[in-house]
Amino acid sequence: MAVFEREVLPNGLRLLTAPMPQVQSVACFIMLAAGSRYETPETSGIAHFAEHMFFKGTESRPTAQIIGNELDGIGAEFNAFTGKEYTGYYVKCAAEHRTRAFDVLVDMLRNSKFEPEEIEREKGVIVEEMNMYFDTPRDYIGGVYHHLLWGDQPLGWDIIGRKETVRDATRDTFLDYVNRWYTGPKMVVGVAGNFDPGVRDEITELLGEVDAGDPGAAPPLEAGVNGSQPGVYIHSKESDQAHIAIGVPSYSLSHPDRYALMLLGTVLGTGMSSRLFTEVRERRGLAYYVFATNHSYTDTGTLYSQAGVDIARIDEAVETIARELTKIVAEPVPADELEKSKNVAKGRFVLQTESPHGMIMFGLRREVLEGAVEEPEDVLAGIDAVTVEDVQRVAQDVLGRNGLKLALIGPFDDAERFEEILAG
């Protein structure tokens, strides 16, 4: 039985619902296929900056405090997030307050004022958020790694942008961005939890007049730039701990081998019994945290491991992780280990989708970007269908075909030293 119900309104806006009558709450989302990948060098960071500004006041709710008071007044949790390829806004609340939640969400996205004085004030907030991000190597290493893989193009830029572009932003910068990308075909409304059929009419009334124009897709990857950069990039920084990301380009969101790729990452680095956790932390004591994961986009992806390691043992840490990434290419994963990893992946997925918030987030990720919602039962079946041969074939294609890339933050400046380690 299908969990999701999908409808397309005349203006191209999609409504995705997941009824969960057994709960007493509802998760109300508006997601858009518009993130930092849709920016230009002159507007880098505007998607994230706009996310902040939508909370700063509308004509009917003139200040951030009024918006906050109204949502706090119904006991709601509310927030927003910006990714490379999408942006999302949500309110989670008791089912009885759904109408109010959507009224506030739509008002913010349709009627925000973008007052120049608020923009100037928020620039300071964004710059301080940048300072926190750049001063937190565990977070910033992801940005360094993305730049290593994809270089000076939108997929390789930091979502948060650059200080100079943030400081240069004006009201027109926001209006140009929002008017272009916040259109019906780019927008998906998501509702999960306990709600009545009236939600369809409610959304039609609130968002039926959104512009039906389709501004197109994000710019494609530059020809030849998909992990073709040099193998090592060092962000030199005095620190007591080095943070590293080692990986390769991988598959897109809808790739037919996506489940085998998911399990490849699970075997390597999900959970306290994974290969990397066991070898890097438990046996060698090289790191406090270490994991591996795959992150996919509409046209590419990356499988990588990340860790925070002892700077005095950095060579051993890089060598150990690289060895585990190459070992799985040459040696098939034992059947019992693959079965355990399937249970890990399925268990994490089931726990994620137990709540309205998790369920609708799962549905929205593919729907907003590809217009192809995936049912939870299909994910579980896809995981179950993966064989030992599938995992090795994908490991050989992804890890065996591409040379390992290493991004590093720490007190180092000799890239050749680490290139030699990766070369074995």
Image (cartoon, rainbow, N blue to C red):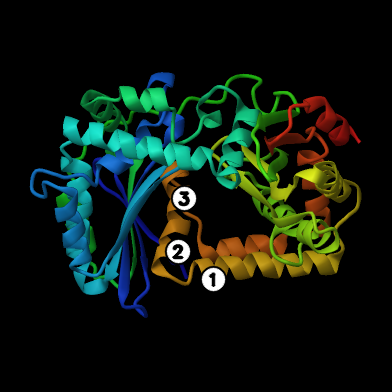
Q: Position of residue 206 (x, y in %)?
A: 16, 50
Q: Quadrant of residue 417?
A: top right
> Dots 3 and 1: beta carbons under 8 Å?
no
- Three-letter amino acid code at disc 3? Arg
Mark 2 or 3, closer to the camera: 2
- Residue 88 in view here: yes
- Three-letter amino acid code at disc 1? Leu
The image's mark for residue 365 is 3
Badge 2 marks a residue whose secondary structure is helix
Pointer 2 residue: 358
Question: Cα distance, mark 3 to mark 1?
Answer: 17 Å
Q: Position of residue 70 (x, y in %)?
A: 16, 61
Q: Earlier in the sequence, mark 3 or mark 1?
A: 1
Mark 3 or 1, closer to the camera: 1
Badge 3 marks a residue whose secondary structure is helix
Along the viewing direction, whichever of 46 and 313 lies nearer the viewer: 313
The relative height of residue 307 versus residue 202 in the rendered view (above or below) is: above
> Dots 2 and 3: beta carbons under 8 Å?
no
Q: Residues within 10 Å of mark 3 (few under 14, many from 20)?
A: many
The image's mark for residue 351 is 1
Q: Earlier in the sequence, mark 2 or mark 1?
A: 1
Along the viewing direction, whichever of 78 and 240 lies nearer the viewer: 240
Along the viewing direction, whichever of 97 and 339 lies nearer the viewer: 97
Q: Residue furthest left?
A: 60
Q: Residues within 10 Å of mark 2 (few under 14, many from 20)?
A: some
- Three-letter amino acid code at disc 2? Gly
